[in-house]
Image (cartoon, rainbow, N blue to C red):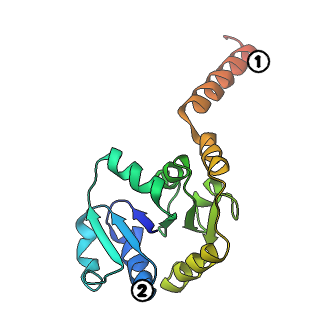
Amino acid sequence: NYYLCVGRVVPYKRMDMIARAFKQMPDKKLVIIGDGWGAKEFDDVRDCKNITWLGYKPDTEMIQYMQQAKACIFAAKEDFGIVCVEAQACGTPVLALDYGGYRETVVNAQTGYLFAEQSEQGVMDAVNKFEANPLANHTLIRENSLRFSVDRFNKEFTDFVANANKEFGQR
């Protein structure tokens, strides 16, 4: 019964902003996994009873937290955002900033919700939207992540090279 925020703790990830949003929603629980030099930005939320900061966790533990979370939250301006795809690979919906790679990796209202504003209010609105309309088709969410699999990349890259070689031949 918690939301999860995971990643490197650096200012541009805006994990501090997510935590401050949850400080304003004391009835909702947030778990933060990550460590980094931006940790000092969390001083004003360390004493919140609904926020738990676990620091660094090995992949096996992080995956368990992802699988059990209501949703994972991402508020950074990312060009891709691999952790967002990893969360979906666990079948976990995401709440992500409507920006950059999240627009490609999240199917809005199916695998997660995109929120327009990089602000505490934007995060709170996304959480409230999710609470009102939870996304529970975990199979669909996981299948969406497979669009970014290594197997798919290898197959499509191999096919591309073979087609290019066939079309242009060796000169």
Q: Amino acid at mark 2?
A: Pro
Q: Amino acid at mark 1?
A: Glu
Q: Which x, y percent locates residue 63?
A: 41, 49
Residue at 58%, 61% (x, y): give it: 100
Residue 26 disc label: 2
In the image shown, does 165 or 56 lie closer to the viewer? 56
Q: Quadrant of residue 18?
A: bottom left
Q: Quadrant of residue 95?
A: bottom right
Quadrant of the image containing the C terminus:
top right
In the image shown, does 61 or 154 lie closer to the viewer? 61
Q: Earlier in the sequence, mark 1 or mark 2?
A: 2
Mark 2, secondary structure of its residue: loop
Q: Which x, y percent locates residue 39?
A: 25, 71
Above or below for 68 versus 41 = above
The residue to which callout 1 is attached is 167
Q: Which x, y percent locates residue 125?
A: 59, 82
- Within 10 angstroms of label 2, few (less than 14), some, or many (20 or more) residues? few
Above or below for 57 versus 167 = below
Farthest residue, direction top = 170
Q: Which x, y percent locates residue 78?
A: 50, 61
In the image shown, does 61 or 78 lie closer to the viewer? 61
Q: Is residue 95 left or right of residue 50?
A: right
